[in-house]
Image: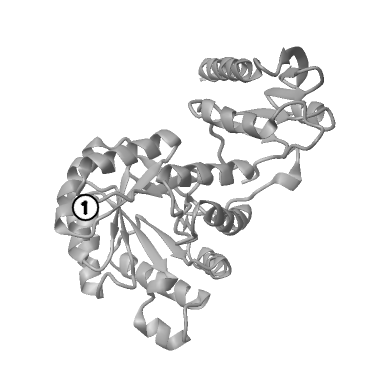
Amino acid sequence: MSLNHVRPWRDIYRRKSRQIMVGNVPVGGDAPIAVQTMTNTLTTDVAATVAQVQAAAEAGADIVRVSVPDEASSEALKEIVRESPVPIVADIHFHYRRGIEAAEAGAACLRINPGNIGDEARVKEVIKAARDHNCSIRIGVNAGSLEKHLLEKYGEPCPEAMVESGLEHIRILQDNDFHEFKISVKASDVFLSAAAYQGIAEATDAPIHLGITEAGGLVSGTIKSAIGLGNLLWMGIGDTIRVSLSADPVEEVKVGFEILKSLGLRHRGVNIISCPSCARQGFDVIKTVETLERRLEHIKTPMSLSIIGCVVNGPGEALMTDVGFTGGGAGSGMVYLAGKASHKMSNEQMIDHIVEQVENKAAELDAAAEAAE
């Protein structure tokens, strides 16, 4: 699918995949790429888990995954599903019965790991539960938990082993006439992940869930994920994504959306274009951007804002943004609206003024969108 006919060098052609449903969220086909995260609270602490799900949803998460390690978590899942504003994926490892219980509890999708879920007979029972409860499945291949026979065959985790693992599990699902599934082939190594995803993308038309597993902390994990997921998305591979960070799940959602926004694949909230600042800056750019990011988190409408410290690039960047501010002299700068110089504003008042201008523009865009429906 071409995303930009005017500038062909920005075109991304998404891989053609089947579409499935994860609760009420379409995944694959021409559906928007869904952003996921995962809770890190004890699932049995229903209040804390629901609060984390709601915070993730408010940040833009389309789907949230919850770990189900024991029977008590299966019981808690029922209430979590009831109170969740988004579909819940149940994360299942080792105990196939947790998958059955999660389907019965109302999970929208079951994530099962071929490397540890058990033999084919057990997988069949999970498939039956998923079918009976209108639940999709994610086949979650992980380089760190590949099946023993594949490690013996290939000697180590490699793209071929990961693809073979995924295809073996796809066969089991298809042999049982179950087709509501997506697949992931994750590794913590960016090169291994990218190669495995390219291989599975060629081998199946199933929707693909992207992730660099165990990517690291907020900074290092963001960089790894941006490189790995960004390149795959640029190639048109990927129908859902999760940025795996040792951080608050809300940060995962933010980073996921920023990756998609940078490629023009999803648009949500204010895209701030800002300079790194230098001695020419007419105001404190870094502090201003930090404050604006916080003050504008409530804006969901896709729009752009340029915050540039001086007139070297400021006017040019403002030409392409909805709202802009460029630093000048004598303690004031120029406000740009819809790409045109509008009026001057003092540095002391400019943050409140920019927030007001962004809110006004968002309301204007929302009204226009409603009128066009």
Q: Position of residue 368 (x, y in %)?
A: 57, 16
Q: Secondary structure at mark 1?
A: helix
Residue drawn at x 57%, y 29% as measured from the top left: 291
Q: Give the answer, above or below, for where 319 lies relative to 136.
A: above
Q: Position of residue 218 (x, y in %)?
A: 51, 51
Most foreground residue, 62 or 331: 331
Q: Position of residue 356 (x, y in %)?
A: 58, 15
Most foreground residue, 267 or 189: 189
Left-right relation of 25 to 354: left
Most foreground residue, 65 or 333: 333
Residue 86 visible in the picture: no
Residue drawn at x 53%, y 25% as measured from the top left: 295
Q: Disc count in the image?
A: 1
Residue 158 visible in the picture: yes
Colouring scheme applied when the structure was drawn? one colour
User: Disc 1 residue type?
Assistant: Ala
Most foreground residue, 206 or 197: 197
Residue drawn at x 72%, y 26% as measured from the top left: 283
Find disc 1 in the rendering and name its residue.
103
Q: Position of residue 186 (x, y in %)?
A: 46, 64
Q: Give the answer, above or below, for where 32 lies relative to 366.
A: below
Residue drawn at x 24%, y 50% as measured from the top left: 43
- For label 1, the crowd category at 10 Å Cα-Cα, with few meaning under 14, some 14 to 19 and many 20 or more, is many
Quadrant of residue 223 within the rendered picture: bottom right
Q: Give the answer, above or below, for where 113 lies relative to 4.
A: below
As drawn, the residue found furthest toward the right would be 312
